[in-house]
Image (spheres, helix red, strand yellow):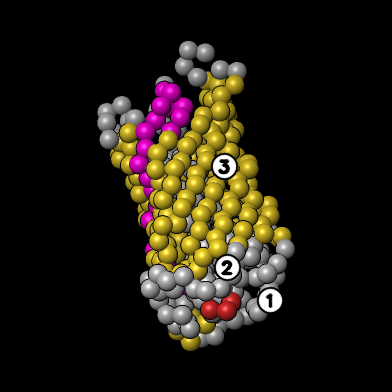
Amino acid sequence: MIRSSIRQVLPIAAMAIAAAVCPREAMAQLLTQHVKGAVGLKAGSQPPPGGYVVLPLAYVYNTDTVKDRNGDKVPIDASINSVFYGAGYSHVTTKKILGGLYGFTFLFPVGANNRIQGTEIDANPGAGITDSVVTPISIGWHHGRVDTLAAFNLFLPTGRYEDGATDNTGMGMWGYEPVVATTVYLDASRKYHAATELSFDFQSKKEDSENKVGNQLNLEGGVGADFLKGGLSVGLCYYAAFKVTDDEIAGIPGILIRGRNKAFGLGPEATLALAAGGKLRGFLTVRYFWETYARTATQGSAFLIQATFLTKPIKLPGS
């Protein structure tokens, strides 16, 4: 019986299309490289030892609204559709560190149509490679009805970037993100679960610039249940993101629109086991968010779809 369906094995996707900005006309806040909603159900549960190939990973963000610090709609055209495609690999070893299993992850972007650039929304930058993310260390613990996870994510400026350009697809900076997460199983059979992941972003200055993105606190997770002997997980997921320090633009703290950006999203998630020939081959995850709250930020919706395949399929019981 497969009760522990594999969580989102790439805890952070390095996409320069996250929705936490306002457009050029408003000179708004800068973006971190964290993508809100990159994890959901069972956010604190590390998958079993083995290799996991993620292909494809697609993320789409849509918005036509910008909110100011008071929650009022800014009277400008903010119609945006940003798309990211990526692929990656995650591996959980049998090696233990501090009693937990050691793992690592990397995600490389295949392509992105990045139209959101932090201080502006570009009209048409075109497609291109964006930034990448590496998780050199991830440690997972399993204690009965509680799983915990600690990790560190490193964002790499592999995307196209030039200070002041209007066709950037990368962020032009290094990003650093410590992560802690937990999943609590609400019954002895581990059918019902609730999870939360906390991460914190801090960044270098942007290339050839004095601009620096403020630090950001992120909360993500969800509550759900498993069905079909663990072959289907469904539930409600969420994210919340809060800037905790001011951006620095041209070396000057603050921006023309005052107020650190905040956003909250809520929506459904479903993960389905992929089986063939009596073996578990992988999982398909679909996640959708409506942003129900935004301040000094765009407000829209996000859709994520991800297929994860085991490098060594697991034989199913009774097959």
- Residue 270 on the magenta segment: no
Secondary structure category for the residue under label 2 = loop
On the question of residue 188 being in view, the answer is yes
Rendering quarter of residue 129: bottom right
Q: Which residue is mark 3?
A: 306
Along the polypeptide, which appears first: circle 1 or circle 3?
Answer: 1
Rendering quarter of residue 133: bottom right
Question: Residue 309 in the image: x percent, y percent?
Answer: 58, 34
* Most distant residue in the top direction: 318
SS assignment for the magenta stretch, majority: strand
Along the polypeptide, which appears first: circle 3 or circle 2?
Answer: 2
What is the distance, in whole Å, between disc 1 and disc 3 at their CAs? 31 Å
Mark 3: few/some/many CA within 10 Å (<14, 14-19, 20+): many
Q: Is residue 254 above or below residue 43?
A: below
- If the image is split into quadrants, where does the N terminus sit? top left
Mark 2: few/some/many CA within 10 Å (<14, 14-19, 20+): some
Q: Which residue is mark 1?
A: 165
Q: Is residue 143 left or right of residue 88?
A: left
Nearest to viewer (mark 3 / mark 2): 2
Q: Which residue is mark 2?
A: 78
Secondary structure category for the residue under label 3 = strand
Q: Residue at horizontal 27%, vertical 31%?
A: 187
